[in-house]
Image (cartoon, grey):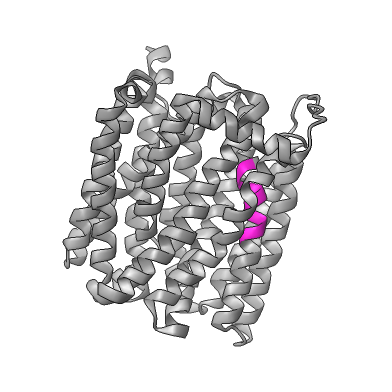
Amino acid sequence: MAHTLESVNPFRTLVRHRNFRLFWIGQTLSLMGTWMQTMAQGWLALQLSNSAFLVGLVSSIGSLPILVLSLPAGVLADRVSKLRLVTICQALLLCEAAALWGLTWTHRITIAWLLVLAAVNGIASAFEIPSRQALMIELVGRDDLHDAIALNSSGFNLARIIGPAIGAFVIATAGIAWCFGVNALSYLAVLVGLAMIRLPARDTPVDDASPFEGLKEGLRYMDGTREISVLMRLITVYAVCGIPYLTLMPVVARDLLGTGAGGYGVLLACVGIGGLTGALFLAAVGQRFRRGQLLMISSYGFAGLLIVFSLTRSEWLARVLLLALGCMMIMNGALSNGMLQAIVPDALRGRVLAAYSLVVVGLAQVVGSFVSGAVAHAVGVDWAIGAGGAIMLAYALFAFRRYPEMREL
């Protein structure tokens, strides 16, 4: 009985691995601040510009460095200490949040400053994201990797629930600047956790090839490995067409649903509650199902719910839809990430995950958010979101029919 209970305990990986526990707690606390900043930055951009296009542009500029630098960052992650690289990048992100707080608090913030600081955030994130993703296997080992990725998603979504709720309260009581100030302080939590991690000594692989040759090696591997290339194409379509609905949420809240900053925060929290549910489901019982089948179900669900969400004008119905949408979105992302990591060899892990972050963060924001913002500006935010869902659904129907082996992964 005790063994059965442990096998369905979604937090068993946290209990087993001290290093992952330290990482997860610090990262989750820091992400609460990050979600406060994301919410406040989108709302501030809308206040300063009154333009859906500029809201999308701020998000796109923040991800442009990730698009440009992620692949070189992956080569670096495969050659140096991933833990040290993550620590340095987190410290830089603290400085960026502090600058954003200072400018907003002193009423010197402008759209131009928002764009500059978003770009600084993107440069640090370009190196931090693939290193953090590749660090996961060093914290838990290969056997618990899928569960750790699901738990990492649960922490992300727990922060998505709590962060916007705190952010809405902070905006109402102390002003929007303090969302950025609290985020700066939250980075201390992750830095303390990273400082306490103790990893076994590992030999850093000696690679005499140039960084450019290392980059080409990673690209050749991804192109020549059928399972990786098929997964990456699905991930790309869903990132570019699906994720940008979150960037447009301030416009949805104000223009379609008629709510203010508080209601906007509740909508983001609903996405987080749904995502947390999906992540904990995967961590608890995901091993009992074929992951390819779960990926297919979540792919259809994510796309279909996005189409329905674009049609609603009821705030209460939108909240219900976002609960389900968040669940499908996080299951889809966590399953894709875990399946990639289960296939890739350790020597290429940083480069493959750099390509993953380039797509999921870089292309999703630079291309997806920019195009979605432009479409929303031209024909309406509902059309921008609904068209993205339709493209996703069409591709998923094609991909799972054309590549039936995806269901067997």
**Observer-nearest of 340 and 234:** 234
Residue 351 is covered by the magenta coloring:
no
Residue 68, compared with residue 48, is above or below; it is: above
Please state if 90 lies on the left or on the right of 36 as rendered.
right
Residue 232 appears in the figure: yes
* Corner quadrant of residue 269: bottom left
Q: Residue at x 25, y 36 (%)?
A: 398
**Observer-nearest of 229 and 82:** 229
Magenta stretch prevailing secondary structure: helix
Residue 307 placement (x, y as % from top left): 21, 54
Tell me how many marks there are: 0
- Looking at the rendering, in which quadrant would you find the N terminus? top left
* Corner quadrant of residue 62: bottom right
Residue 128 is covered by the magenta coloring:
yes
Q: Residue at x 57, y 84 (%)?
A: 110
Please state if 371 lies on the left or on the right of 347 as rendered.
left
- Looking at the rendering, in which quadrant would you find the C terminus? top left
**Observer-nearest of 277 and 353:** 353
Residue 205 placement (x, y as % from top left): 78, 26
Residue 25, compared with residue 243, is above or below; it is: above
Residue 320, compared with residue 266, is above or below; it is: above
Residue 238, compared with residue 82, is above or below; it is: below
Task: Report the span colored magenta.
Answer: 122-130
